[in-house]
Image (tube, rainbow, N blue to C red):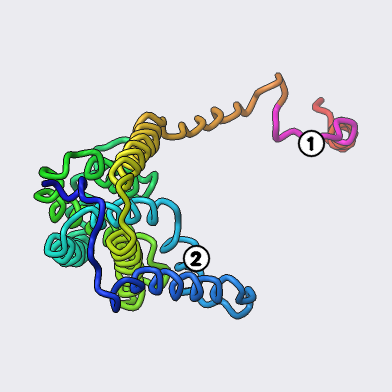
Amino acid sequence: MSLENDTERTTPGALRWSGPLLAFLGIALICALILETRSERSVTTWWILNSGLSAERVMPLAGLGVAIALARGRHMAVALATFLLGVVLGIAFRDRYLAIMADVPGLTTHLFLTGPVSALTAGLLLILPARVRRWILPVCAMLIGAMLGVATTLTDPTLHDPAISMIATLIGLWILAAIGLSGHAFWHGWFPIAARILGSWLIAIGLLLGGAAIASKPPVLARPPPPASLTEGGANRFETPFAGINRQGDRSRNAARPSLP
């Protein structure tokens, strides 16, 4: 019987509330960062609120977390491990990825399309049948992790501070674990249907963002005006604007010049 057809799951009492507890602790920490005044916020705090927790980063991770919640325990552990491996590979081979995407139009939008690629991957993972999903879950988790690693290095405001990469990885693991453990603990029969609906939304978002980025034309620089001619307007540009002074000076010079016999 497929896991998605199970109406009940047995979760040990010690682990039943682990997912909601992780979600509560993470949300409380985020609220504490939001309540900080602008003068108290560091560069790392600014990056967490504006890039690490942006919708473009959170939505694919949430989709992957739902896919992990639909999987069995051993598949969940493998998915988390391959996600970590993907983050490491994305950070290490960022330049190779940028070189591959160099010829794609609109590549600078959405951080070299890391957001649309992650959304499409998570959406396709959710709409696939359970038997297929369990086998491609590690590959999709690795790809989403790699896109997170690339996006992290591109938005790092500290220029290669290891703390930024570590925080991005912890945020990703927090989202995956909170959603995955909560889904396992509070399973309902309608979860697979909701997962497929979420997957279709993620696919639509990925196609819209990626298509808009590729179809957009780069701004065309205006051509500089041609250099003006020195005799433009029929007058010499180097002529003194006070013509009367020139004529009076010519008369005085002509009067002082002796006449020829």
Q: Which mark is residue 97?
A: none
**In-front residue for pair 231/49:** 49
Displayed quadrant of residue 169: bottom left
How packed is label 1: few (under 14 Cα within 10 Å), some, or many (20 or more)? few
Magenta highlight on residue 106: no
Estimate the spatial distance between the alpha carbons at disc 1 and disc 2, rounded to whole Å: 63 Å
Q: Is residue 162 above or below residue 126?
A: below
Region of the chain picked out in magenta, as a range? 236-245
Residue type (three-letter) at the residue carrying disc 1: Thr
Q: Is residue 43 above or below residue 121?
A: below
Q: Residue at x 71, y 20 (%)?
A: 233
Secondary structure of the residue carrying numbered label 1? loop
Magenta highlight on residue 241: yes
Q: Position of residue 177 (x, y in %)?
A: 30, 67
Nearer the observer: mark 1 or 2; the answer is: 2
Q: Position of residue 119 (x, y in %)?
A: 32, 45
Residue type (three-letter) at the residue carrying disc 2: Leu
Residue annotated with mark 1: 240
For residue 59, side relative to residue 34 (left or right): left
Q: Position of residue 207 (x, y in %)?
A: 34, 34
Q: Which mark is residue 49?
A: 2
Q: Earlier in the sequence, mark 1 or mark 2?
A: 2
Q: Residue at x 29, y 61 (%)?
A: 180
**Prevailing secondary structure class for the magenta stretch in the rendered image:** loop
